[in-house]
């Protein structure tokens, strides 16, 4: 999907919400365990409840890999079920080189048919460019929310830049605006203004709003561009908001609350 197609979805739904499908078989409502494929049944009901309120879905691949062959089958069925006009993100954080990256690219883009994949750029252009395909997007880890981000990402270089700034500056030139996005954690919203100076027109995937403590108002204030330019992810705060037989009803209510807040922000900053 292109940036324009994503923006059109944002305008249509008055939302820049990405729902994280971090589906843990040990956390889903226990009554689903009697289903032939509990993970897919959970995802199906979450998708039905939220598809009119979000513009992207982001399965965290680790939750599916951990279940072996059954997990991959659940993931494929989930992707097949997601409406075609909703952006799909493989949160895989792959970061190898050469032929290995080519094979990862084939797996996520040609076999599973994701629209995008998250990639760690530590090994340089060799770990990113094999994912650059027409109508597909590489989402480069720019600045993350975890405490360990302090170990490397903030290191001051001889140029005076911090490492994460150099990574974003360098990688933005490896593809087009349609081909490259960046991950910026919501708890790092104070850095969004600086990041927007480096990449004013790119889309940013912003995880960490909700259960991880990120502030949506601050993210919007510092991260919006003329076409919104943000996909803000919420996972646990929506999909695990309730564990009863009405978990999907509660998930819809939680997603609606976020969508309404997003609509207010889109109107405030004259994006709609």
Image (tube, rainbow, N blue to C red):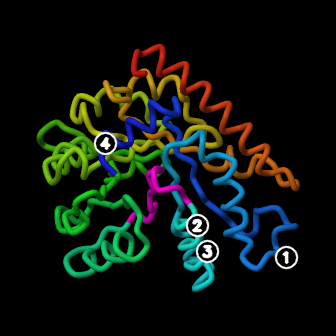
**Would you call the spot at circle 4 few (<14 residues within 10 Å), some (14-19), or many (20 or more)?**
some
| Nearer the observer, 271 or 150 | 271
- Mark 3 lies on a secondary structure that is helix
- Mark 2 lies on a secondary structure that is helix
Does the stretch in magenta take in 116? no
The answer for how far apart the CA atoms under marks 1 and 2 are is 18 Å
Q: Sequence-wise, which precedes: disc 1 or disc 2? A: 1
- Mark 1 lies on a secondary structure that is helix
Give how far across and how far down residue 32 sits, in percent.
Answer: 82, 68
Q: Is residue 41 left or right of residue 12?
A: right
Write the residue at 77% across / 62% down. 28
Which label number is shown at residue 82?
A: none
Give how far across and how far down residue 228 sits, in percent.
Answer: 38, 29
The answer for how far apart the CA atoms under marks 4 and 1 are is 41 Å
Please state the extent of the stretch shown in magenta in the rendering.
82-93
Q: Residue 227's quadrant in the figure?
A: top left
Write the residue at 55% across / 59% down. 82
Q: In the rendered image, which quarter contains the C terminus?
A: top left
Circle 3 sits on which residue?
74
Give how far across and how far down residue 151 sits, in percent.
Answer: 38, 51
Write the residue at 76% across / 50% down. 248
**Would you call the spot at circle 1 few (<14 residues within 10 Å), some (14-19), or many (20 or more)?**
few
Circle 4 sits on which residue?
3
Q: Sequence-wise, which precedes: disc 4 or disc 3? A: 4
Which label number is shown at residue 78?
A: 2
The answer for how far apart the CA atoms under marks 1 and 3 are is 15 Å
Q: Sequence-wise, which precedes: disc 4 or disc 1? A: 4
Which label number is shown at residue 34?
A: 1
Q: Are marks 4 and 2 in contact (CB under 8 Å)?
A: no
Q: Sequence-wise, which precedes: disc 1 or disc 3? A: 1
Q: Are marks 4 and 1 in contact (CB under 8 Å)?
A: no
């Amino acid at each position: 999907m292109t940036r324009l197609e994503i923006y059109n979805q944002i305008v249509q739904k008055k939302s820049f919400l990405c729902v994280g499908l971090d589906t843990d078989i040990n956390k889903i409502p226990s009554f689903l365990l009697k289903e032939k494929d509990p993970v897919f049944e959970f995802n199906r009901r979450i998708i039905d409840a939220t598809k009119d309120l979000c513009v992207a879905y982001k399965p965290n691949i680790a939750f599916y890999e951990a279940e072996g062959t059954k997990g991959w089958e659940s993931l494929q069925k989930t992707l097949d079920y997601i409406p075609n006009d909703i952006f799909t993100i493989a949160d895989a954080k792959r970061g190898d080189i050469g032929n290995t990256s080519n094979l990862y690219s084939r797996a996520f883009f040609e076999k599973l048919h994701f629209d995008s994949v998250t990639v760690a750029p530590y090994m340089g252009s060799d770990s990113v460019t094999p994912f650059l395909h027409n109508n597909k997007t590489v989402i480069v880890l720019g600045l993350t929310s975890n405490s360990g981000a302090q170990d490397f990402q903030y290191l001051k270089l001889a140029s005076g830049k911090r490492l994460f700034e150099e990574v974003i500056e360098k990688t933005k030139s490896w593809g087009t605006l349609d081909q490259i996005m960046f991950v910026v954690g919501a708890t790092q919203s104070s850095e969004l203004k600086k990041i927007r100076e480096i990449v004013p027109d790119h889309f940013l995937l912003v995880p960490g709003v909700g259960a991880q403590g990120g502030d949506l108002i601050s993210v919007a204030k510092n991260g919006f561009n003329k076409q919104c330019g943000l996909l803000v992810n919420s996972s646990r705060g929506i999909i695990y908001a309730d564990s009863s037989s009405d978990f999907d009803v509660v998930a819809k209510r939680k997603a609606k609350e976020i969508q309404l807040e997003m609509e207010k922000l889109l109107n405030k900053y004259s994006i709609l």
